[in-house]
Image (cartoon, rainbow, N blue to C red):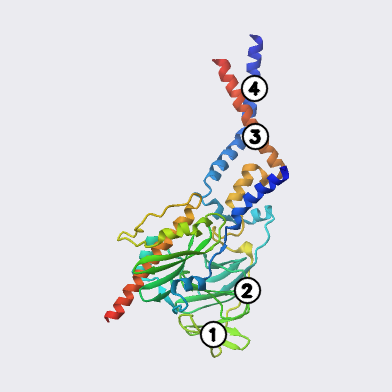
Amino acid sequence: MRNGKLTNRFFVTWHRRVGLFVALLALILCVTGVLLQHTERFKLDRTYLTAPWLLNWYNYPEPRVDAIQLSQQQVRQIDDQILLAQTIVGQSKGQLWGAAETSETVLIASGHVLIWLTLDGEIIDVMPTPIAEASSTLARTGEQFQIWTPNGWLIADPELSNWQAGPDPGELPLAVEPSDFRQAALPPELSVGVSLERLLLDLHSGRLFGFIGVLLMDLASIGLVLLAISGCWLWLRRR
Amino acid sequence: MKQSLILIYLLLCVAPLANAKGQYMSESAFLTQAFGESVPARQMLWLRGQLKKDVIKLLGHSYGKIRLYYWHHGTTTSWILEQIGKEKPITAGFVVDQQRIVQTHVLEFRESRGWEIKRPAFTQQFEFIELTDNNRLSKHIDGITGATLSVNAMNRMAKLALRLDQEVQLTLAQRQTH
């Protein structure tokens, strides 16, 4: 009888201690686990975090950012993704080399790709550049776009279907300036930075804090098993 | 013996991947299948006004660009369209004749799952399908297990091709009237 009381007291004491130790970690395990179950619904794999401390923590390599300032908004290329203001408008394996705007449209040139947009960022068309080189100069004359080639300037028809030899552009080409990634305000869906899914996975497994984190999560998991056993034991004894 | 079994198992695991993403048919090959050797000139269609609204209603979102290309000869139009399956776009070609799909081909598939939609057993289901008045396909398309998103993307593109064909035929009829 006395042995039974002692065993009960032992289990109650350790049940409380283990419970206290496990509480916070179990909370993290459960919350991150539930969120990860619904990765698609919460768009965790399509939401990217770019807070400087987080990028430093992950040793995230600095992405290349090039920018061209238009009259009202900015064109940026961050790694392979191209943005007009805060809207992702396309991808390119090459580098941003030009952007120009008319009264109704914007033309962006990167690598071998031309992206033609409305001023609101709606894509009109994506087409190959009319030149063999992966970089040149883009300019405009009035409502027509122009591209520099070694043989002189080309000028496009209003529908950008044909490029023919043309005069020197009326407007000076806009300069491509390198920009600081960490200073840039970026839309969360831009796939640059640490994905929310990865952060939650690392928080769930403890890897965010290295070996110590993994060890703590292992102990928390073992603690949960012990809680289940001691809880069942105590419940059965009281009956 | 054990090593041979492991090798066979690994080959069986890898074999389906060989069929996965890639370009299955070039644009020119598709157009040759559609029109024979004399492929008509490429034409443009702009998604504006009511057509743009209809496309958004059909797809559940905007198409992604507002200028589309098509090829037209007689009552036949041919469309090369793109829609995202899960994450990357699937490129498919549709030939529409007299407002019915007569050919469907998956031209390029860029994801690792769902490539089974390229099989003729699947694409042949679209033959002779029309667009009903309530913007549905006139025939049920059987899905493929594990390729639901790709199948949905193909269904959306089929509807889009039929709606765009209607627009082209309507414009041509109006031109002839004037």
Q: In front: mark 2 or mark 3? A: 3
Dot 4: element: helix
- Asked if marks 4 and 1 touch (Cβ < 8 Å), the reply is no
Dot 1 or dot 2, earlier in sequence: 1
Determine the CA span between mark 1 and mark 3.
Answer: 66 Å
Dot 3: element: helix
Residue B56: image quadrant is bottom left
Task: Judge whether A136 appears above or below A74 on screen.
Answer: below
Q: Nearer the viewer, residue A73 or A111?
A: A111
Q: Chain of mark 3?
A: A
**The residue under label 3 is which amino acid type?**
Ala
Residue A13's label in the rendered image is 4
Q: Chain of mark 2?
A: A
For the residues beneath circles 1 and 3, the answer to whether they share a chain is yes
Residue A171's label in the rendered image is 1
The crowd level at tag 4 (other Cα within 10 Å; few <14, some 14-19, many 20+) is few
